Image (cartoon, helix red, strand yellow):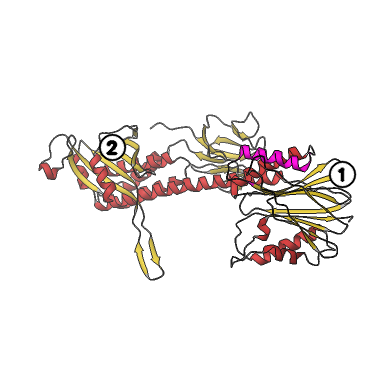
């Protein structure tokens, strides 16, 4: 088999793979456009690293990069690369780069096998050699390409059984078997349209979960047990089920039951020129082939699942960073109020947000919103609502018109089951506070004399009914008063006994806080909520905004 040039397999953060041959050296890596491998990430240096070739082989060199160059997790300045090495360019959440040597994996494995098998009698040590080879095949699960793993499995089986053809069937999600790979001796690829195999044997093995070794007529499928002779047109067939190991489970600490094995696929091998040779295979060899083959496929499947989970987590982290970036980077400062706000999503991203909108005449619009649902869908709608509301509110329309326009916008563009509650008020220097509460929990005013007032309003949430009216209410803040706006994640926080924190505990947390600043009051409330819930996981996002009116 002709050797191949060494190559890099590059996987980006979205899970897309590309392959580049190292046709000449030095081979440079970095974000500048004239590198052989260009990586679009500002954290990667313009000339980050390079690969050269010397008497030792291919050598990776760091070129004084800002964040360093890594091989298999260890920082290096210079390193001789080996097949399968994982290259990192300073950041772990951008690109994954694998170095593949010029010799393909299979010939090197088979060469090791042949050396190990020299002088070994058959079939006595065949089991040991089979286990050795398939264990090496399992190492391929760390390779980015699943097809290379499967190809090695089939070619290894052909080498060990001396069969002419090998077909690998994998089970699909619907339970059916799909011909994933067909190979002949010598590394010949047979395509995916092979049909002249024993369908009956494959079906029986898949249904029974037991391997078969038989000789049958190619045309009729009749076995030698039926015909009583071995004539022309016969083929020897070996088919083994590839099954996930059964798990031992214990019921309430008393009885142990064994779960049924899960069929992953079927490995089929046949031989036309020497049909009878297939029946002489050691049964232990076939059992080992089935066991180790299933392990290879299952590990590769788990590897793919893990990579997919990592990709999803990366996407969530990006979404969380974007959502955090939509919050005000700095709370506004004025000489007539003090302000503090905090939001905590119950998942990586959430549906709560707060915003402060600067308006003409030294006025400020104060928003706390809570979108129905959790996770990514709620976060997307929250971002949509935040953008639409801020854009309309910046024009300073009257509050009734503002809510009418945003409500109609959401009704037109969001699913009927999605809606949002919102509290929005406009505060001016004199202490006048005009507000609309659309289905939101009542905000609280803690007066300087210790009295607590609830700001309620009977409006519908946003996004439920097109053309719905919204009533505007008002209050007046006096110097020393505290305005507390929150989402229902605060009052509906649950402890380990599923008891609600509730408005009564919120009011109790505010007692004695009239002389405290907004940040101290906010910290006090959050501390009380956390102390109440203990270690209980929360199902809702929590947002709290505190305004202390009057000069500092």
Say whether disc 1 or disc 2 marks the residue closer to the N-terminus. Answer: 2
Q: Which region of the structure is painted magenta?
A: 397-419
Q: With 313 as the anchor, is 261 left or right in this view?
A: left
Is residue 68 visible in the rendered structure shown here?
Answer: no
Report crowding for label 2: few under 14, some 14 to 19, many 20 or more residues within 10 A (C-alpha): many
Identify the secondary structure beneath mark 2.
strand
404 part of magenta stretch = yes
Q: Quadrant of the C terminus?
A: bottom right
Residue ID for mark 1: 362
Q: Nearer the viewer, residue 388 or 284?
A: 388
- Residue 99 in picture, x, y percent from top left: 52, 39
Residue ID for mark 2: 165
Picture layout, residue 493 above or below residue 116: below
365 part of magenta stretch = no
Q: With 161 as the anchor, is 489 left or right in this view?
A: right
Q: Nearer the viewer, residue 189 or 451?
A: 451
Is residue 269 visible in the rendered structure shown here?
Answer: yes
Q: CA distance from mark 1 to mark 2?
A: 82 Å
Q: With 31 as the anchor, is 548 left or right in this view?
A: right
Q: In the rendering, which numbered label is found on residue 198?
A: none
- Residue 418 in picture, x, y percent from top left: 60, 45
Q: With 195 as the anchor, is 407 left or right in this view?
A: right
Give the residue displayed 36% in from the left and 57% down from the top.
246
Give the residue displayed 26% in from the left and 37% down from the top.
164
Q: Quadrant of residue 216?
A: top left
Q: Looking at this rendering, what residue extends furthest in the left direction?
A: 228
Q: Nearer the viewer, residue 397 or 31?
A: 397
Q: Nearer the viewer, residue 261 or 123?
A: 261
Q: Main secondary structure of the magenta part?
A: helix
């Amino acid at each position: 088999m002709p050797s191949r040039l060494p190559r890099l397999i590059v996987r980006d953060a979205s899970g897309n793979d590309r392959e580049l041959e190292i046709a000449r050296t030095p081979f440079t890596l970095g974000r500048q456009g004239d590198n052989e491998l260009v990586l679009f990430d500002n954290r990667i240096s313009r000339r980050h690293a390079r690969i050269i070739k010397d008497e030792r082989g291919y050598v990776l060199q760091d070129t004084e990069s800002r964040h360093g160059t890594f091989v298999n997790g260890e920082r290096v300045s210079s390193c001789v690369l080996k097949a399968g090495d994982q290259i990192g360019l300073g950041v772990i959440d951008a690109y994954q780069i694998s170095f593949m040597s010029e010799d393909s994996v299979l010939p090197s494995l088979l060469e090791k096998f042949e050396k190990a098998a020299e002088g070994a009698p058959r079939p006595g040590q065949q089991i040991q050699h089979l286990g050795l080879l398939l264990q090496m095949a399992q190492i391929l699960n760390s390779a980015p390409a699943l097809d290379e793993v499967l190809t090695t499995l089939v070619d290894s089986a052909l080498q060990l059984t001396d069969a002419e053809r090998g077909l690998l069937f994998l089970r699909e999600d619907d339970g059916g078997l799909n011909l994933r790979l067909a190979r002949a001796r010598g590394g010949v690829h047979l395509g995916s349209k092979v049909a002249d195999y024993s369908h009956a044997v494959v079906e029986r093995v898949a249904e029974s979960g037991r391997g078969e070794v038989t000789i049958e007529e190619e045309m009729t499928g009749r076995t030698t047990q039926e015909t009583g002779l071995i004539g022309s047109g016969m083929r020897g067939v070996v088919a083994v089920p590839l099954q996930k190991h059964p798990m031992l489970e214990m019921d309430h600490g008393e009885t142990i039951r064994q779960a049924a094995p899960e069929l992953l696929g079927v490995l089929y091998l046949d031989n036309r020129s020497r049909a009878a040779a297939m029946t002489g295979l050691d049964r232990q060899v076939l059992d080992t082939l089935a066991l180790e083959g299933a392990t290879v496929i299952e590990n590769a499947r788990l590897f793919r699942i893990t990579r997919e989970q990592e990709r999803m987590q990366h996407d969530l982290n990006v979404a969380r960073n974007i959502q955090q970036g939509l919050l005000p980077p700095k709370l506004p400062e004025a000489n007539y109020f003090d302000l503090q706000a905090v939001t905590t999503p119950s998942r990586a991203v959430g549906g709560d947000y707060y915003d402060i909108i600067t308006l003409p005449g030294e006025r400020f619009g104060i928003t706390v919103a809570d979108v129905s649902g959790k996770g990514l869908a709620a976060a997307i709608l929250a971002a949509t609502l935040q953008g639409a509301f801020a854009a309309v509110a910046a024009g300073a329309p009257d509050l009734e018109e503002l809510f009418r326009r945003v409500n109609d916008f959401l009704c037109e563009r969001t699913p009927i089951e999605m809606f949002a509650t919102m509290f929005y008020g406009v505060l001016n220097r004199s202490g006048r506070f005009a507000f609309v509460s659309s289905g939101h929990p009542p905000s609280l005013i803690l007066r300087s004399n210790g009295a607590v007032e609830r700001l309620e309003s009977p409006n519908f949430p946003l996004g439920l009914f097109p053309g719905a009216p919204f009533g505007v209410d008002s209050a007046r803040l006096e110097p020393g008063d505290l305005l507390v706006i929150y989402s229902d994640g605060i009052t509906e926080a649950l402890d380990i006994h599923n008891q609600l924190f509730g408005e009564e505990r919120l009011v109790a947390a505010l007692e004695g806080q009239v002389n405290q600043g907004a940040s101290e009051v906010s910290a006090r409330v959050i501390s009380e909520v956390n102390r109440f819930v203990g270690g209980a996981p929360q199902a809702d996002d929590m947002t709290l905004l505190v305004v202390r009116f009057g000069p500092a």
